[in-house]
């Protein structure tokens, strides 16, 4: 019996994708610093806050007030993150009420 040689198929040659100028490496540690610098230089966050009229307050109790950390704490943080993200996308001005101290964005 003769041995048939298998030709290895390179999958990148089977997918027809457009050529782009995007780098192959994301370089997030440097890219994030550039984005933050751009936001600070152009005062983007401050401009967004000035445009928002309605205040949205999140009431959050003290962290881990009822003993050791458990899954309920993680669920609370996830729900709070989703709620705050929804409020921000709804163009409301965020503030936080935690431990009896109100901290509103000025």
Image (tube, rainbow, N blue to C red):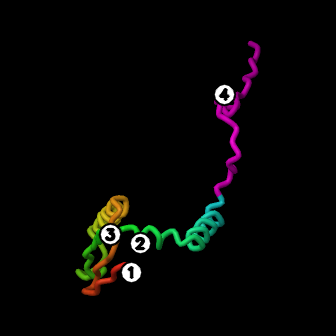
Q: How far apart are marks 2 and 3 (CA)?
A: 8 Å
Quadrant showing the N terminus: top right
**Element type where label 3 sits in the image:** loop
First in sequence, mark 4 or 2: give its number. Answer: 4
Callout in the foreground (1, 4): 1
Residue 14: quadrant of the picture: top right
- On screen, residue 23 versus residue 40, left or right, reads right
At 25% from the left and 75% from the top, the residue drawn is 59
- State the residue position of label 3: 53
**Element type where label 1 sits in the image:** loop
**Any magenta on residue 79?**
no
**Element type where label 2 sits in the image:** helix
Residue 47 at x, y percent in the picture: 47, 70
First in sequence, mark 3 or 1: give its number. Answer: 3
Q: Distance between the residues labelled 4 and 2?
A: 51 Å
In contact (CB < 8 Å): disc 2 and disc 3: no
The disc at residue 50 is 2
Q: Distance between the residues labelled 1 and 2?
A: 9 Å
Foreground: 105 or 79? 105
Furthest-left residue in this view: 66
Which range of residues does the magenta coloring cover?
A: 1-26
The disc at residue 4 is none
- On screen, residue 66 versus residue 32, left or right, reads left
Q: Distance between the residues labelled 1 and 4?
A: 55 Å
Foreground: 43 or 2? 43
């Amino acid at each position: 019996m003769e041995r048939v040689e298998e030709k290895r198929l390179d999958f990148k040659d089977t997918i027809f994708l457009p050529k782009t100028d995007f780098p192959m490496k994301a370089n997030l540690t440097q890219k994030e610093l550039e984005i933050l610098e751009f936001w600070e230089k152009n005062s983007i966050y401050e401009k967004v806050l000035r445009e928002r009229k309605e205040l949205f307050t999140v009431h959050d109790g003290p962290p881990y007030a009822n003993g050791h950390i458990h899954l309920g704490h993680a669920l609370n943080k996830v729900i709070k993150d989703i709620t705050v993200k929804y409020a921000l996308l709804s163009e409301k001005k965020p503030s936080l009420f935690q431990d009896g101290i109100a901290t509103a964005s000025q």
